[in-house]
Image (cartoon, grey):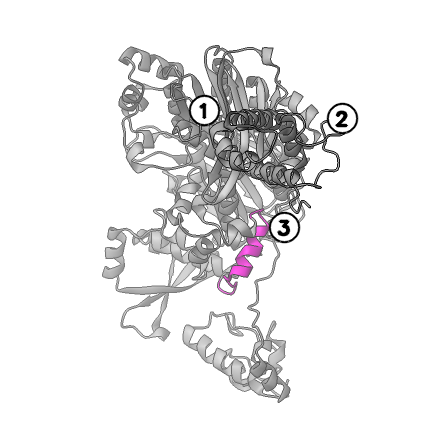
Amino acid sequence: MVILEPPQPLLRLLIEALPAGVVATNGGGAPSDFGTGEPDEILAYAATLASTLADSGNFNSTEWVEELAPYLAVLPALKDADDVEEAVGKFCSAAENALQSADDSSDEEDEFGGEELTNLRFSLAYGGKILLHQTKLRLRRGHRYALVGQNGVGKTTLMNAINNGKLEGWPVELQTEYVDSGSNVDPVHEAKIVFDHLMKSTDKSEEACKGILEQLKFTDVMMKGTIGELSGGWQMKLRLATAVLVDADILLMDEPTNHLDHKTVEWLQDYLIGLTGTTVLIVSHDTQFLETVCSDVIHYEQRPQWGPHRKLVHYAGRMSAFVKKQPQAKHYFELSETDLKFVFPDPGRLEGIRTSTQRFLEMEGVNYRYPGSDKDTLSDIHLKMTLSSRVCLVGANGAGKTTLVKMIVGDTQPSNPTACRFFIHHNLRIAYVSQHAFYHVEQHWEDSPVSYIQWRFKDGFDKEKIESEAYRITPEEQKAIDDYNLEGIWSRRLRGGVLEYEIKKKNVREKDNIYVSKDELLAMGFKHLLRQTDEKIASKEAGLDLRPVTTTEIQSHLDDFGLAQEFGTYGKIRGLSGGQKVKLVLAAAMWNCPHLLVLDEPTNYLDREALGALSAALNNWGGAVLMISHNKEFYGSVCKEEWIVADGKVTVEGDSGEREMKAVARKKKAVKEETIDTKAEKAGGNTNADGDKYKDATVNFWGATVSKKEARQYDKAKKKGDVTLMRKILQIPMNKVMPGFEELGDGKTVP
């Protein structure tokens, strides 16, 4: 009796490989009455051992003989060791052929054209996660392959493995050149001189290097400058120039259209289509680019017969032909066709803004000139933004788009402050996802996404922003603070249209604090201190001081951005794909419920499904959106207004219109978890339990801001339920009820 249940296909192949008569068959190659004798038990065990070898991709006939021969040798039909070795070798070959024919991982015909460069079977893992299992990769010379799949399946990992020669069975004689996405910021690399770096990395002549750079419109100043001085688009052009000069067998390109303007994308398309002797493997989320350039598609797929792991499946033809064969992939051409959802938190109330068309930003006659330059980068700018604004900044690489964005988010100031109007609402909360947002996240390489957000917001404000260069207090400013004997800025108020800050000096009593206008403090050199103060006050208005930074709360927030618990709580940032890092950066930026979301090239790393989810979330969100993007399909689905930057000017086209007012979310209340003792106290009528029904005190009856000392006294009185003392602290006259504090009564009757 056979106890084992061997894989039937392998058992059949084993029986066919043995001499006739070992097992009786029913005429179709299948055993009849199998399991009734000792030979059947041996064959079942041998087939089971063979399945282990086949599952691991091991088809070395010598190892098969070593594993199976000791058991098959006892069969009477196999007379000697040669018969056994011959039968096992035949069995091994048949099993390998059967696996390849059942793979169904390609619709390519043998005569499809081009010299075969690779035809290998391999597995690929990252950390402890298997990305690809026993998959086939067959590349032909002159073909241009689109490598497509969801974020996190391992596209960039495969590219790196090929480039570093770490892929099992990869032909070592093939020369590869890798154009990476540029997501990693390397200070050492950015300090190199552009032209010198190109000559050294390509080993080409000065004439050849200068020729390709001039073709890509590099100026002499840019060639002699450092790589770090180039914008994201120009850095990508430099990587492309390197690839063009290196005559490689295989060109690997990871998001090559990142940051590129339309003209450069057209140049790249023409260049790639003109390649005949080079094979190109491209990862890109720009479907139209892939449709124009690529001749084949290699798709990451997961099928039931393959178990839990993915394989690469080859489709001959363009992206459109691939989508016809795989209708579930139609989101590659239609952003709306996606099941993934992002949920953005509604922006909180913005003081004084009562409609979605009321301006929170105005620029009239604004100029900007970089320090040391003799020419304005931007001049005579006239712009406005409201909560209804959905704006895309459009322009060539280096036109000044990022320069304008940095002025809007407060990183820089106009170069003509006294001759222009530049107004930004003092309580405006801005989420800025920049081109180099990955740089900050990757400083926490070994932390989980949850731990990163906890570190960033545990103090009730955005620690990463406060520590950034745009907010960091300089030594000169610190000296001015010390000379002024300033202990700190305690509060802020708007009086007569003028922002005033409560100043606490060292060794001066609290009641002697003074209010100083913003202009006066700026004149004293307290620019960064004021920025920090405004940021902390805005964070408090959003309720960040009350919002818990527990693992559960943060993971729930990450779930709204499509970052599952596997990656958010239990994974590390170094293990995230480019698209997953974008989701983390978005989630962290939206933690403080911003009024304005600024996105610099948001389409660079998100897959098509995530782009569709982002488009839908932005359209449903109640805040304003400002983005820089060269992907018209994406920004056209969100933005109805374009700011075209060219020749130092900004031209407005279109109108965002009016949207429903959603920026009215109330400040979060701290929810206290009741303990058994608390419940018992309430049941017993303890007055301390009533403290939470009274509001916090920020201003008194006459509209003046309460001091910190009065706030502490009020908090103690609130916990005791001492209504008389609370009314006294708030200076509420007898027989009067303070609006918003009706629970304190009129002073005559006990509320």
**661 in magenta:** no
- Quadrant position of residue 225: top left
Q: Above or below — where is 52 with respect to 571? A: above
Disc 1 versus disc 3: nearer the observer: 1
| Camera sees residue 606 | no
Marks 2 and 3, Cα distance to the nearest angstrom? 83 Å
| Camera sees residue 142 | yes
**557 in magenta:** yes
Marks 2 and 1, Cα distance to the nearest angstrom? 52 Å
Say which residue label 1 marks: 252
Few, some or many residues within 10 Å of mark 3 (<14, 14–19, 20+):
some
Q: Above or below — where is 89 with respect to 370? A: above
Say which residue label 2 marks: 27
Residue type, numbered disc 2 = Gly
* Numbered disc 1: secondary structure: strand
Where residue 208 sits in the image (x, y, percent)? 32, 12
Residue at 54% across, 81% down: 727
Where residue 511 sits in the image (x, y, percent)? 37, 75
Residue at 52% across, 11% down: 114
Chain-order first, disc 1 or disc 3: 1
Q: Above or below — where is 706 with respect to 411? A: below
Residue at 33% across, 34% down: 370
Where residue 88 sits in the image (x, y, percent)? 55, 28
Give me the disc on residue 355. 3
Chain-order first, disc 2 or disc 3: 2
Q: Above or below — where is 644 with respect to 433? A: above
Q: Is residue 57 left or right of residue 179?
A: right
Residue type, numbered disc 1 = Leu
Marks 1 and 3, Cα distance to the nearest angstrom? 50 Å
Few, some or many residues within 10 Å of mark 2 (<14, 14–19, 20+):
few
Q: Which residues are magenta?
A: 545-563
